[in-house]
Amino acid sequence: MNNEINDPKLKAQTEKLIPFHGYLSTGAFIGIQMLNIATRLLDIKDDERIFVTCETSNCLPDPFQILRGCTIGNKGLKILDHGKMAATINKMAQPGQKHVKGVRIVLDPERTASYPLFHSWYMNTAKVSHEDAIAELLKADENVYSWYFVDVPVPARKKKKVTICRVCGESFVQEADETLCKWCAESYKSK
Ligand SMILES: [Zn+2]
């Protein structure tokens, strides 16, 4: 499969991704293409920190983790599990900036329709192998995506308040003045 990728940069990206993700999945390959589109549109340099919000937890986040170091723990990666093949990418804000320019990229069903085999993978109307789906993506290149620029709000730094839960005695970071940790609050609700 990997031999069919002629572009040396794309080939190196997939070679780095495979041991991390386990194999070259269609969704992970889509993530690579989205990353490359954003890199071009936002003029992202190799050593620049980026932030991504992926709208599915499936495959799509992995290239951003392994190729750009965006992780949940370093806040470079956010997942909205909406089951959508879409991602918003932005660079780091400058000090004092409340918004930063980002780009939202979507795998566009109106555009994938021009590639029937790939479209049936996307709509899950036929069993299409990853090899066949990726072969179509290599042909289509950027033609299956739509994108537009967005203003991404920069999260305000809040002072961290830590307290002890009155039920379990464990410490937690308060959002407001709540006295129950979320774990205990949830188990009260379910009773
Ligand atoms: Zn508790």
Image (cartoon, rainbow, N blue to C red):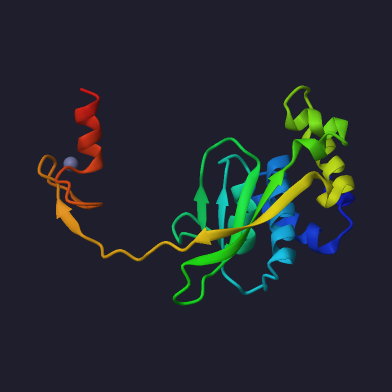
User: Picture quarter containing residue 73?
Assistant: bottom left
- Side of 173 where 5 appears, left or right: right
Residue ID at (51%, 71%): 93
Residue ID at (85%, 31%): 117
Question: Where residue 175 sits in the image (x, y, percent)?
Answer: 25, 52
Given residues 148 and 78, the one toward you in this image is 148
Question: Where residue 62 sits in the image (x, y, percent)?
Answer: 61, 50
- Side of 69 where 10 appears, left or right: right
Q: Quadrant of the N terminus?
A: top right
Q: Quadrant of the C terminus?
A: top left
Q: Above or below — where is 168 with respect to 52? A: above
Question: Where residue 101 sits in the image (x, y, percent)?
Answer: 59, 65
- Side of 23 where 157 appears, left or right: left
Q: Above or below — where is 36 with respect to 124? A: below
The quarter of the picture showing ligand 1: top left
Given residues 146 and 50, the one toward you in this image is 146
Residue ID at (11%, 39%): 167
